[in-house]
Image (tube, rainbow, N blue to C red):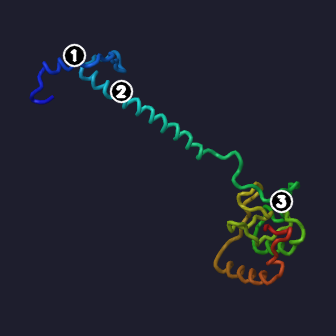
């Protein structure tokens, strides 16, 4: 309201404006003031937009929450299917370099890969080593092997053994039925 505006101008403006519907505030038992009623009427379209927008945001959050739900199928599936329920020779025993050498000596690359016929030094795509039955982490039947003590001296001895094994032609065999890949 400017300096030249008086009550007469306001009354004449109100007389020439179209009639408005009566507005009810959301709280019926609260006493209202005409100015508050007019303020609420001017904000009503914006409030409905905000409510609609809030509903959309809430729906998107509910849809996005499914990203945190467990999947119906496991992410890693077993790479091999066997009809037997057997585990490897060193299952629930110490899975050290001597046990691996024994399994490697018995491994026949020409026979299909199984719990008792696998290369214990072979790695999967992510670099994981197999357990005592030839299963890799993430596969259904994987069991954490009983590992030996580790020290720098033991690792140096194992490196020498691995150098000797790498000279064996069976060590570099790939693409056979007994190989992972």
Q: Earlier in the sequence, mark 2 or mark 1?
A: 1
Q: Quadrant of residue 92?
A: bottom right
Q: Hey, which residue is sitting farthest right in the picture?
A: 111
Crowd rating for badge 1 (residues with CA inside 10 Å; few <14, some 14–19, many 20+)? few
Q: Is residue 52 above or below residue 79?
A: above
Q: Which residue is mark 2?
A: 44
| Image disc number at residue 175 | none
Residue in the image at 38% along x and 30% along y: 47
Q: Which residue is mark 3?
A: 87
Q: Quadrant of residue 142?
A: bottom right
For discs 3 and 1, the disc positioned in front in the rendered view: 1
Q: Earlier in the sequence, mark 3 or mark 1?
A: 1
Per the image, label 1 sits on a secondary structure element best described as helix
| Image disc number at residue 15 | 1
Q: Is residue 93 above or below residue 54?
A: below
Q: What is the spatial separation of the Cα atoms under label 2 and label 1, in whole angstroms?
A: 23 Å
Residue in the image at 79% along x and 75% along y: 98
Instruction: Tell which of 149 and 145 is nearer to you.
Output: 145
- Callouts 3 and 2 close, C-beta under 8 Å: no
Instruction: Tell which of 133 and 16 is nearer to you.
Output: 16
Residue 107 falls left or right of residue 71: right
For discs 3 and 2, the disc positioned in front in the rendered view: 2
Q: Is residue 6 above or below residue 107?
A: above
Image position, residue 169 (x, y; %): 83, 81
Residue 48 falls left or right of residue 94: left
Crowd rating for badge 3 (residues with CA inside 10 Å; few <14, some 14–19, many 20+)? some
């Amino acid at each position: 309201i400017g300096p030249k505006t008086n009550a007469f101008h306001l009354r004449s403006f109100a007389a020439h404006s179209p009639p408005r519907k009566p507005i009810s505030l959301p709280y019926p038992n609260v006493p209202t003031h005409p100015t508050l009623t007019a303020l609420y009427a001017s904000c009503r379209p914006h409030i409905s937009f905000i409510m609609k927008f809030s509903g959309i945001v809430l729906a998107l959050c509910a849809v996005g929450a499914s990203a945190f739900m467990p999947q119906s199928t496991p992410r890693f599936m077993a790479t091999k299917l066997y009809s037997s329920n057997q585990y490897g020779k060193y299952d629930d025993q110490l899975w050290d370099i001597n046990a691996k050498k024994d399994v490697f000596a018995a491994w026949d690359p020409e026979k299909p890969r199984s719990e008792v016929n696998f290369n214990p030094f072979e790695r999967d795509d992510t670099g994981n080593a197999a357990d005592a039955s030839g299963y890799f982490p993430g596969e259904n039947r994987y069991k954490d092997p009983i590992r030996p003590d580790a020290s720098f001296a033991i690792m140096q001895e194992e490196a020498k053994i691995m150098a000797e094994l790498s000279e064996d032609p069976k060590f570099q065999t790939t693409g056979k039925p007994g190989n992972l890949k």
